[in-house]
Amino acid sequence: MACESWREKLDAYVDGELLSADAARLANHLRECAACSAAVLELVQGKRAVRVAGKRYQASVQLREKVRQSLGTQERRPQNWIWKLVALPATLILVLSFAAALYLEHEKNQRQQIYSELTDLHVATLASATPVDVISTDRHTVKPWFAGKIPFTFNLPELQGTDFTLVGGRVTYLEQMPGAHLIYRVRQHQISVFIFQQRGGRTAISSSAPLSRLSFTTESWTKNGLRYFVVGDVGAQDIEGLSKLLRDAG
């Protein structure tokens, strides 16, 4: 397929909206076409710039104080103390329910945001001319390469007899935290595994079973103080399979 035809699909690929088969074919094309790879990187960088710009506005202290004073000066009708006593438990339940709903919504938004950023990293890495800095199918070569480059160590699974192949790895960053980015291949698809230290912040999101977002599937969990993320344009079965191997790695 000519580059012109692929160019029409780049936006959908970056946003994870392509069918799995089309995404795999386009990923193969990106490894061979520098022009399309550059276009994908530009799109990913644009998404990141928009995301960063969206975080810049915060209400000023003066505005928050003005709103607080406005709420505090609203007229309140006198209420009988018995009515207050009766209404208190219901009010507490309402407040707690509202707080729980806000927390769950925040957790959901935080998870979606971090998965979106990691999906961008996955796409940008595969579109790069050098997706990995250490190229090897041997876990005993890839794991030692990270020594001194990241402030933690991790174990990699034995893949003999499975459908997965280790391609290599590179150092990556999330919220200025260094981590390991490993690439695995299953059939014609590429899967990214990100490993970071569990230090709170957005990496402290709750663990999740495989989640499908359009053409990408993700999974996350913690083990031995590390947070693992698995991202790929494959089905939940492949993500679960690789995740189980990583969890069981001794």
Image: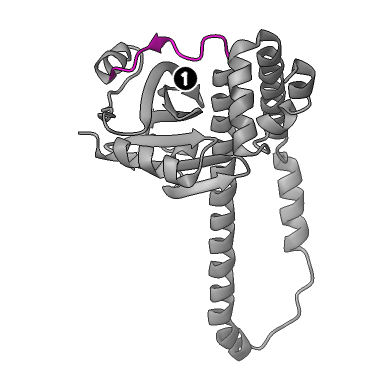
Q: Is residue 135 found inside the magenta-colored segment of the image?
A: yes
Q: Is residue 151 magenta?
A: no
Q: Residue at x 76, y 80 (%)?
A: 77
Magenta part of the protein: which range?
Answer: 128-138
Q: What residue is at 73 percent from the left and 35 percent from the top?
A: 57
Q: Which residue is mark 1?
A: 172
Foreground of the two, 205 or 10 = 10
Q: Is residue 198 visible?
A: no
Relative to 101, residue 175 above or below: above
Q: Is residue 11 left or right of residue 34?
A: right
Can I make out residue 34 in this image? yes
SS majority, magenta: loop
Q: Quadrant of residue 17?
A: top right
The number of callouts visible is 1
Q: Going by the image, does 222 lie left or right of 213?
A: left
Of residues 144 and 149, which is closer to you in this image?
Answer: 144
Q: Residue at x 61, y 11 (%)?
A: 32
Q: Can you give x and y, in whole percent of width and height, for residue 18 in the image?
A: 67, 36
Q: Position of residue 214 (x, y in %)?
A: 63, 43
On the rendered image, what quadrant is the C terminus found in? Answer: top left
Residue lying furthest front: 1
Out of 95 and 228, give the one closest to the viewer.
Answer: 228
Which amino acid type corresponds to the residue marked 1 in the rendered image?
A: Thr
Q: Quadrant of residue 158?
A: top left
Question: Residue 78, relative to residue 159: is it above or below?
Answer: below
Residue occupying image coordinates x 72% and y 20%: 1
